Amino acid sequence: MHDYTQAHNRVRAIFFLHGAAFSSWVPHIPLVQERLNLGHDDLGGILLAAAIGVLSVMPIAGRLSDRFGSERVVRYSGLFYFIAVGLPAYMPSYLSITIAMFALGFSGAFLDVAMNANGLNVERLRKRSIMSGLHGFWSLGGFAGAGVAAAWFALPIPVTAHLPVVLTLFLIAHIVAQAGLIPDAVFHAQTSAPCAADTRQSDVDLKAGKSGKQRSLIVFLLPFGVCAFIGQFGEGVITDWATVFMTRELSSGATMAAVGFAIYSCAMAATRLSGDMLVMKFGRARILLTSSILASTGTFIIAFAPHFVVAWIGCAIAGMGLAVILPLLLSAASQSTGKGGGTVVSIIAATGYSAIMAGPPVIGAIGAAFGLVIAFTVTASFLALIIPAYLLSLRKVL
């Protein structure tokens, strides 16, 4: 019996660093908007460039992870990601920041798919649920990154020095952590024997026929992707627009807005770290439906908050609701199909991960036309659609 604890800890570290880097950039969004005098629609446009970067990488990230090994893709995509995160904050024009945001979305999604693929492999090797916990470490990184940013902004230190310093440290830590990731070859060697999940997949293949195997898999995973899209849409909106909302609509200032995002990240981290236990105790279906209700309620509270402190409460509730939706769906899809690694992640990511970048520009356009209160109300309503989506398509699977 092999001990995969070290590999588990190393992939935890990769998730932590990814989240810390991204949340270090988020508090700079309202500063960039102010510096370049961007309207809500302009800001939505540069966020759309990041969405395009995400979408462009989805068809190839999973395939490359499966072909060359997720651990290798993590290694090299991370080198680009930790550089790309810092670029948008220093771009001098709308065009240059748009290109930088595309690079951020592209490299971030590449690393995201590969680290989730590696995490799914470790989960099956350890024979216990770990995906919610891994995403919990992403959120812990988000809390740490946002917390450091809030403290940095409050101190008499140049804001322009923030990203170069922290991202250099994250890059060094990434180089150390990725060296201990488990190679995909080990996963394939250890799981070559038939198991229950593989038997279920064999039944699917026999029904669909060998020529329709991939199409059958895509159709089977589509409901998972739809629910992932809804959840990730909400996560993307709160990540990119909550600080802007608190700054512009509630006059919180950059420091208090960063505190609100840190609270959101902390609530998400705490929920994700306990998510594997909650799923085992209450079942995936109850956790998914409860998550939808909490996410929708929290976003409604943000939309109608009379003060930024009330918005903080909404951030906490929304963070708890959004926390386990994606890892729950990834784990369920992998176990239901018997597929791990890049195959499952890339298919679900085609619908789910794109939303975390596609949501903000959509909300930017709505905000420019009708105001951010309406935009957040639309987001809250959209998050409630996970419930009918589950009832119509996932009831018999989860």
Image (tube, rainbow, N blue to C red):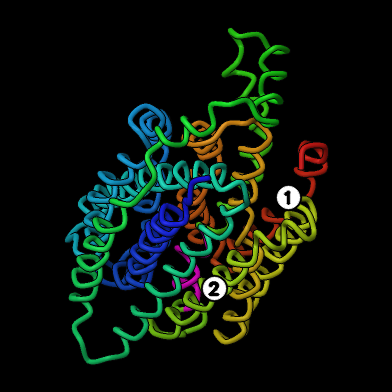
Mark 1, secondary structure of its residue: loop
User: Does residue 355 show up magenta in the picture?
Assistant: no
In the picture, the disc for residue 264 is 2
Residue for point 60% across, 9% down: 210
Question: The residue under label 2 is which amino acid type?
Answer: Tyr
155 or 136: which is nearer to us?
A: 136
Q: Indicate the amino acid at tag 1.
A: Leu
Say whether disc 2 or disc 1 marks the residue closer to the N-terminus.
2
Please tell me whether mark 2 sits on a helix, a strand or a loop. Answer: helix
Callout in the foreground (2, 1): 2
Residue range in magenta is 237-246
Is any part of residue 396 visible from this angle?
yes
| Quadrant position of residue 247 | bottom left
Q: Are marks 2 and 1 in contact (CB under 8 Å)?
A: no
Asked whether, in this view, residue 86 is left or right of residue 386, the answer is: left
The reply, left or right, for residue 278 in relation to residue 36 is right
Q: Which quadrant is the C terminus positioned in? A: top right
Position of 150 with respect to 340 (left or right) is: left
| Residue visible at 62% across and 24% down in the picture | 217
Q: Quadrant of residue 374?
A: bottom right
Give left or right: position of 208 versus 27: right
Q: Position of residue 80 (x, y in %)?
A: 23, 49
User: Which residue is painted at 71% across and 66% down in the image?
Assistant: 294
Q: Which residue is nearer to you in this view: 186 or 220? A: 186
Give neighbour class at mark 2: few <14, some 14-19, many 20+ (Cα, 10 Å).
many
Instruction: Give the residue number, with chain letter if any, for mark 1.
Output: 385
Report how far apart the C-alphas of labels 2 and 1 lie in the structure: 22 Å
Residue 242 inside the magenta-drawn segment: yes
